[in-house]
Amino acid sequence: MSHYLRLFGFTVAILTAIIVGSAHAVTISTVPVGYAGNSPDPATGSLYGAVPYNYNIGTYDVTNAQYVEFLNAKASSADPFGLWLSPVMNPAGNPGVAGISRSGNGPYSYSVISGYANKPVAGMTWYSAIRFVNWLQNGQGNGDTESGTYTITGGGNNSGTVTIPDAAQRAAWATTNSFHWLLPSENEWYKAAYYDSTPKTYYAYPFQSNTQPSALAPPGTADSGDFANSQGNPAYNSDGYGSYLTDVGSYMRATSPFGAFDMGGDLFQWTDTQTASQSTARGGGFFGTSISSASTARFLRTPAAGYTDNGFRVASLGGPANLPEPSSALLAAMACGVIWCWRRRFKQFA
């Protein structure tokens, strides 16, 4: 009998470890982007849009709630990499946009401002977005930020030399079971936003439309988003929290051809493509007119700078596409099932 009790205890301990280890704080939803080998967009001089492999892109921008988990995991005892960039990410210095507060003088504690949990996180640098991706790749928790998908050497406060996986490496990852999180390349972002697979052409705007979008409050129309009515004049501020941003996915009918939300409006989004010393951002934001979301609009920004109207979404390559991790509830149910079986087995020998 003692043998079965020890084995029972061992089984419960293993299942408990699995449950705890599998309950990641941040879950990223993605949509598949297929039709590998598409041609580039001739409207850009055939410079952008061609991707020779299949991949997934984030359904939504990374939110304040998700970024807070990252901050509390990697920037609580100290923040040597400037993952929380004051004053851009400080609500006191950036009202209406910043949604994360920090308390303490080191160690720090981070929390989401009421009403901002599902709004896209704004103000992080390109380096912080890269480090968030590495953290995802390394399993979250205390996962490393300086290696993984990207190798950062000589890194400091929003600095360092970053080794970015090229198209050949990405293609290799895409055809293996080795799963990788990434910041989308400019071509990956562009294709997900504008490519129409049926006639194999490109839309002018990331809402399956060639008509300039309208600045409307959500849920809006099929070609509207969170833009300014005129440059520097946000269209509305009516969510009850004084925010210029909308919750991700609020424009339910305005999606990209592959089903991603908010690829135009709310915030510009970092890609991992660099030109000289600048990093590329796409998509337009609440502070500019909707023309900024056009396929021909390309923005080069300083990677070490935090911008009020800049956020990011992630992409993934390789591995089983879009298979969620087992939930804690499911694993707990499995544990209960095992316990029930062991109890029945134990009674037979009592």
Image: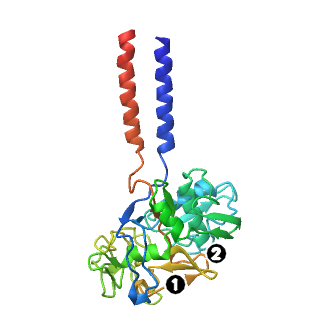
**Residue carrying label 2:** 304
**Residue carrying label 1:** 299
Q: Is residue 169 above or below residue 293?
A: above
Residue 194 % position (x, y): 36, 79
Residue at point 60%, 62% (across, down): 102
Q: Label 1: state its secondary structure.
A: strand
Looking at numbered disc 2 in the image, what kind of residue is underneath it?
Answer: Ala
Work out whether residue 305 can be spotted. yes
Q: Which residue occupies the foreground of this view, 251 or 327?
A: 327
Q: Label 2: state its secondary structure.
A: loop
Work out whether residue 110 can be spotted. no
Looking at numbered disc 1 in the image, what kind of residue is underneath it?
Answer: Phe
Residue 306 % position (x, y): 59, 75
Residue at point 50%, 68% (across, down): 121
Q: Quadrant of residue 190?
A: bottom left
Q: Is residue 35 above or below residue 298?
A: above
Q: Is residue 340 above or below residue 312?
A: above
Q: Quadrant of residue 159?
A: bottom right
Few, some or many C-alpha atoms within 10 Å of disc 2 (few <14, some 14-19, many ≥20)? some
